Image (cartoon, helix red, strand yellow):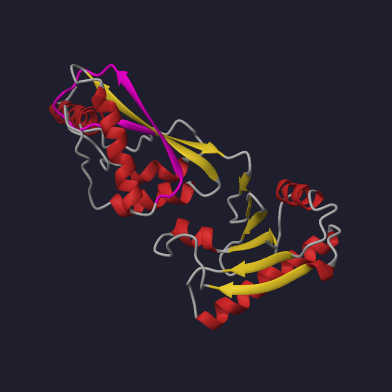
């Protein structure tokens, strides 16, 4: 083997060693690699938002955030739509106090509440095995719990049962109720409960605050009319329906987040009190 070939081989081995060392430090020690602690593999939306964000130091319940925090929180809030609750599991490890897991879960909950989380939460604490006490750690896990009374789909459509009615959610700039079989089945089930009811049924369209108030008033009415037509096709007499639009005037969530805007793009169908 020539000296030149030997030198090239040493250089290649050195580069490989550097790559392995850097990955071990970044992923193993600092835990900044793109690995989601979410137990539900369908919640991949959050995967790229972690990267060293929302972490804790050893024996500390103080949540550490960075410039990715706003997008991370928006990702969580968007995934709560149509969910009954979020389980926040806080971890403790090594010689830390067991109650630290619960304190970390509570810290996560508080951070989400400040940014507009309204979904119910369940807090839990777990002790796990971990030898490293020098680096920060993602000491929590999120589990999104589906509501039996709600169906939400990736295309923006959704249905949620209320005590005296039902909600139909719409995508951005849409008034066409292109509902899946599952969503229509949910709506038809509620219509079936109207049998024998002689009172009025209120069908009210709502929007987020994107665009002008005039355009939102129009979209709210178009959504209400499209749902009214769907209800009529399911057997509800047209004269029983009271159709209106409130546009952007009656939001149920803040329009400052995508999750809030999703919740506000809706048609409320209720029995008249």
- Residue at the farthest bottom position: 214
Residue 98 locus on image (x, y percent)? 25, 20
Instruction: Let me know if residue 174 appears in the view.
Output: no
Along the line of sight, the residue nearer the viewer: 98 or 72: 98
- Residue at the farthest front position: 273
Q: Judge from the rendering whether residue 242 lies leftward or rightward of residue 128; answer left or right.
A: right
Question: From the viewer's perspective, is residue 191 above or below residue 3?
Answer: below
Tell me, yes or no, whether the highlighted magenta stretch contains residue 136. yes
Residue 46 locus on image (x, y percent)? 41, 44
Residue at point 51% right, 80% down?
Answer: 213
Residue at point 38% right, 35% down?
Answer: 36
Task: Determine the image quadrant of residue 102.
Answer: top left
- Quarter of the image with the N terminus in it: top left
Residue 197 locus on image (x, y percent)? 81, 56
Question: From the viewer's perspective, is residue 238 above or below residue 66?
Answer: below
Tell me, yes or no, whether the highlighted magenta stretch contains residue 3. no
Q: Judge from the rendering whether residue 22 lies leftward or rightward of residue 250; answer left or right.
A: left
Q: Judge from the rendering whether residue 256 lies leftward or rightward of residue 93; answer left or right.
A: right
Instruction: Let me know if residue 127 appears in the view.
Output: yes
Q: Judge from the rendering whether residue 193 lies leftward or rightward of residue 29; answer left or right.
A: right
Which residue range is magenta in the image?
117-141
Residue at point 25% right, 24% down?
Answer: 99
């Amino acid at each position: 083997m020539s000296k030149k070939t030997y030198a090239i081989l040493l250089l290649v081995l050195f580069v490989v060693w550097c790559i392995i060392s850097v990955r071990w430090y970044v992923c193993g020690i600092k835990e900044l690699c793109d690995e989601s602690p979410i137990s539900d593999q369908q919640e991949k939306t959050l995967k790229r938002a972690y990267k060293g964000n929302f972490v804790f130091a050893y024996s500390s319940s103080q949540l550490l955030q960075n410039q990715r925090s706003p997008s991370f929180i928006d990702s969580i809030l968007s995934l709560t739509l149509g969910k009954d609750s979020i389980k926040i599991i806080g971890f403790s490890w090594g010689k830390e106090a067991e109650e630290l897991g619960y304190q970390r879960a509570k810290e996560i909950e508080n951070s989400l509440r400040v940014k507009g989380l309204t979904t119910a939460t369940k807090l839990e604490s777990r002790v796990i095995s971990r030898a490293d006490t020098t680096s920060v750690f993602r000491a929590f896990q999120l589990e999104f719990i589906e509501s039996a009374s709600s169906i939400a789909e990736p295309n923006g459509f959704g249905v949620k049962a209320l005590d005296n009615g039902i909600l139909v959610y719409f995508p951005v700039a849409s008034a066409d109720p292109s509902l899946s079989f599952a969503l229509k089945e949910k709506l038809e089930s509620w219509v079936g409960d109207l049998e024998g009811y002689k009172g009025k049924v209120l069908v009210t369209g709502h929007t987020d605050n994107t665009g002008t108030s005039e355009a939102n008033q129009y979209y709210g009415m178009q959504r209400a009319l499209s749902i009214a037509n769907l209800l009529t096709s399911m057997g509800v007499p047209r004269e029983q329906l009271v159709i209106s639009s409130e546009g952007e005037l009656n939001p149920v969530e803040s329009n400052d987040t995508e999750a809030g805007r999703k919740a506000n793009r809706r048609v409320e169908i209720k029995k008249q009190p």
